[in-house]
């Protein structure tokens, strides 16, 4: 769960006084809070953890990491259906 | 075991490995304190590519694994209430409490929801004013700022039906506890990259100096780990013990100042129990006085729940590097990802689960790789 995934900022808007962005993670789009990197701009990359941009990242290393995660199936693990994953494990004590 | 051809840049990987092999002259034991690194090390067989003299000890770096059974039981109690919507990250669903888990609570009618971000839970609270919405706030310094921001927003927007069940933990006190243990074998640390993306590196020079251990900030991709190990072995062989940053593309010395300021406002340092290890002084955060009304433990009066951990589970010894997962008698026999005794066998960042999934171990517990991408 400490996985932090690089993503590209597509657009930025103010919501309830909070700076929010749409961020592209190798084709998966998510809402991300920019309050901890307020000067992040459209087109830039950042490391995102549970919907929060935590640190800026250069484009080249961001794309290299995204390719690796995609090859390893880690984007599916991060953004896939958690109920399906949990259901694949039988119940405690059975 | 994986092969070096599967690394993103096999030639660079081989160069780093060659240098580590050429540098090392005697046995060294280093600990990583990051579940993502542990998973990556086992998945890619990095420990098997390293010289025999370099031992990686898998420390208590998986947040799911160190969350105490007692806190899981409190979560299950709160999630079972009819007036509650209980929100969590997906990897907590299968962590066993006493006799059941969150997945079963949902099956029994509890309103348990998985969210991507804690802000999603806050939105659920806004949409369900007649419900109490609780978010399960676990994790290290990487996850604490998002949860802190969510509580801050709840207060700012006047959303009173939201609360946080908090069990946040901090890496530096865990390093100190490990070094103080009489049975400690650790001679160096790979510090968790994304923890340092938030906190920076200022907490570590004092630890490196006091315990005479190199501390190398390391990322969790395979090449990052090799680079962290290379720098650590270099320091050990030269008799140095400094803080070094092997993950500069994501870690600045000052960390993320805005996130650190929010942590300081919303949380205060407190003693925390670590599953399998016990209480470590000053090793966690709780909500500060200003935000105490958002603390789910107070709101739902579950403070009286106390739970002992099962004696058969030796996860505490695994987390302190005293045994490897397969050296536990229960490993692969009575304890499997399908029927886990402890959280280290549940989370995919746990050392036991990683060994079970990616290691072919001899004897009756032998297990083929089941990873879909294996």
Image (spheres, helix red, strand yellow):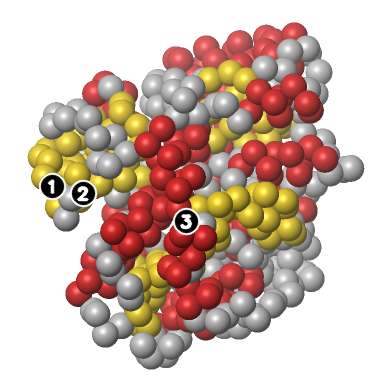
- Mark 3: give few (<14), some (14-19) or many (20+) Cα within 10 Å: few
Look at the picture and state if B274 lies above or below A73.
Answer: below
Please name the residue that numbered disc 3 is placed on. Answer: B370
- Mark 2: give few (<14), some (14-19) or many (20+) Cα within 10 Å: few
Marks 3/2 same chain: no
Q: CA distance from mark 3 to mark 2?
A: 42 Å
Please name the residue that numbered disc 2 is placed on. Answer: A18
Q: Position of residue B272 (x, y in %)?
A: 66, 57
Q: Quick check: marks 2 and 1 in contact, CB under 8 Å?
A: yes
Front disc: 3 or 1:
1
Furthest residue in direction right, as rendered? B182
Answer with the quarter of the image where residue A70 lies.
top left
Marks 3/1 same chain: no
Q: Indicate left or right for B185 with B191 as reference.
A: right
Q: Indicate left or right for B332 with A29 as reference.
A: right
Q: CA distance from mark 3 to mark 1?
A: 44 Å
At 54% from the left edge and 69% from the top edge, which residue is drawn?
A: B95
Instruction: Identify the chain of the residue marked 3, using the numbered disc in the image.
Output: B
Front disc: 3 or 2:
2
Q: How many marks?
A: 3
Residue A83 numbered mark, or none: none
At 58% from the left edge and 18% from the top edge, which residue is drawn?
A: B244
Between B223 and B254, the residue placed more toward the observer is B254
Between B55 and B87, the residue placed more toward the observer is B87
Q: Indicate left or right for B223 with B1 as reference.
A: left
Instruction: Identify the chain of the residue marked 1, using the numbered disc in the image.
Output: A
Please name the residue that numbered disc 1 is placed on. Answer: A14
Q: CA distance from mark 2 to mark 1?
A: 5 Å
Look at the picture and state if B215 lies above or below B163.
Answer: above
User: Regarding mark 3 in the picture, which secondary structure is present there?
Assistant: loop
């Amino acid at each position: 769960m400490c996985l932090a995934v690089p993503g590209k900022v597509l657009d930025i808007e103010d919501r309830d006084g909070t700076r929010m962005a749409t961020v592209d993670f190798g084709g998966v789009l998510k809402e991300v809070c920019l309050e901890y990197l307020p000067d992040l701009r459209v087109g830039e990359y950042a490391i995102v953890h549970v919907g929060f941009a935590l640190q800026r990242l250069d484009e080249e290393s961001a794309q290299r990491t995204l390719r690796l995660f995609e090859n390893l199936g880690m984007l599916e693990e991060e953004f896939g259906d958690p109920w399906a994953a949990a259901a694949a494990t039988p119940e405690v004590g059975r | 075991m994986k092969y070096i051809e599967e690394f993103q840049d096999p030639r660079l990987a081989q160069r780093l490995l060659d240098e580590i092999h050429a540098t090392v002259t005697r046995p060294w034991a280093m600990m990583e304190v990051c579940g993502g690194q542990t998973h990556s090390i086992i998945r890619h067989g990095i420990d098997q590519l390293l010289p025999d003299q370099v031992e990686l000890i898998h420390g208590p770096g998986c947040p799911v694994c160190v969350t105490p059974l007692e806190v899981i039981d409190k979560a299950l109690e709160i999630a079972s209430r009819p007036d509650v919507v209980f929100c969590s990250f997906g990897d907590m669903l299968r962590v066993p409490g006493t006799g059941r888990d969150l997945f079963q609570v949902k099956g029994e009618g509890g309103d348990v929801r998985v969210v991507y971000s804690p802000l999603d839970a806050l939105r659920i609270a806004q949409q369900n004013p007649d419900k109490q919405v609780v978010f399960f706030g676990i994790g290290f310094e990487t996850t604490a700022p998002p949860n802190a921001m969510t509580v801050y927003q709840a207060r700012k927007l006047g959303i009173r039906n939201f609360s946080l069940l908090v069990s946040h933990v901090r890496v530096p006190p865990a390093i100190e506890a490990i070094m103080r243990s009489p049975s400690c074998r650790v001679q160096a640390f790979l510090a968790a990259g994304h923890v340092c993306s938030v906190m920076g590196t200022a907490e570590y020079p004092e630890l490196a100096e006091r315990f005479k251990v190199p501390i190398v900030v390391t990322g969790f991709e395979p090449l990052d780990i090799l680079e962290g190990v290379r720098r650590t072995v270099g320091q050990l062989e030269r008799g140095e013990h400094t803080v070094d940053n092997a993950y500069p593309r994501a870690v600045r010395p000052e960390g993320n100042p805005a996130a650190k300021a929010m942590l300081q406002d919303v949380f205060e340092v407190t003693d925390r129990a670590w599953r399998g290890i016990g209480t470590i002084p000053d090793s966690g955060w709780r909500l500060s006085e200003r935000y105490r009304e958002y603390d789910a433990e107070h709101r739902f009066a579950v403070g009286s729940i106390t739970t002992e951990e099962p004696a058969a589970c030796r996860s505490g010894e695994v987390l302190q590097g005293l045994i490897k997962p397969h050296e536990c008698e229960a490993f692969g026999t009575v304890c499997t990802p399908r029927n886990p005794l402890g959280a280290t066998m549940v989370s995919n960042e746990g050392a036991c689960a990683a060994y079970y999934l990616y290691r072919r171990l001899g004897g009756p517990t032998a297990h083929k790789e089941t990873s879909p991408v294996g």
